[in-house]
Image: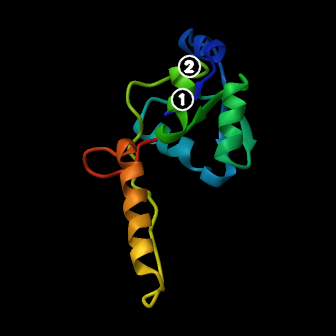
Amino acid sequence: MPIAAPPVAARFRAKKDVTLIRARSRFMDWSRWQKTRQAFSRGAKWLTVETRAQALDAALAGAGVALMDMAYIGPHVAVGRAKMLAAQPLKLSTGYYFVYAPGAKNLHLLTVFRDWIIEAARPFRDTEGRAQG
């Protein structure tokens, strides 16, 4: 989901140029967004940071628009620190794997942990089980 601080969101809605923030750890996110959604700006300026956490911090500070996973933005949107700039998040085909050795000790604890992770992620998944971002 593209997000921005309220003043940047207002500039975006007024169709003024905004800086797009991308994280090196998820470098292709903007390309994926623009392939499936309307491009933000052909001559956009870019701010590249190392991590998604830095991208979120930069967006909240008013540096531009960042693409963020829904799991990260809820509290910021709820208190008005960030605005969502699209009606729907992009559905991603990426995900995570829970891996452990075949003869792992404390298998019961691993199973409890795995179940907890799956349940904690449930609000951020679509009806087909894909992450939203």
Q: In this view, does 92 lie above or below 3?
A: below
Q: Residue 79 carries which label?
A: 2
Mark yes or no: residue 45 visible. Answer: no
Mark 2: amino acid: Val
The single residue placed furthest to the bottom in the displayed view is: 103
Percent coordinates x, y for residue 73 in the rendering: 53, 33
Number of residues whose C-alpha sits closer than 10 Å to that of mark 1, classed few (under 14), some (14–19) or many (20 or more):
few
Residue at mark 1? 75
For the residue pair 112 and 123, the one nearer the viewer reads as 112
x 74%, y 36%: residue: 47
x 42%, y 80%: residue: 107
Mark 1: amino acid: Pro
x 49%, y 41%: residue: 71
Q: Which mark is residue 105?
A: none
For the residue pair 15 and 109, the one nearer the viewer reads as 109
Percent coordinates x, y for residue 39 in the rendering: 50, 30
- Residue 110 figure quarter: bottom left
For the residue pair 71 and 11, the one nearer the viewer reads as 71
Q: In this view, does 33 lie above or below 117?
A: above
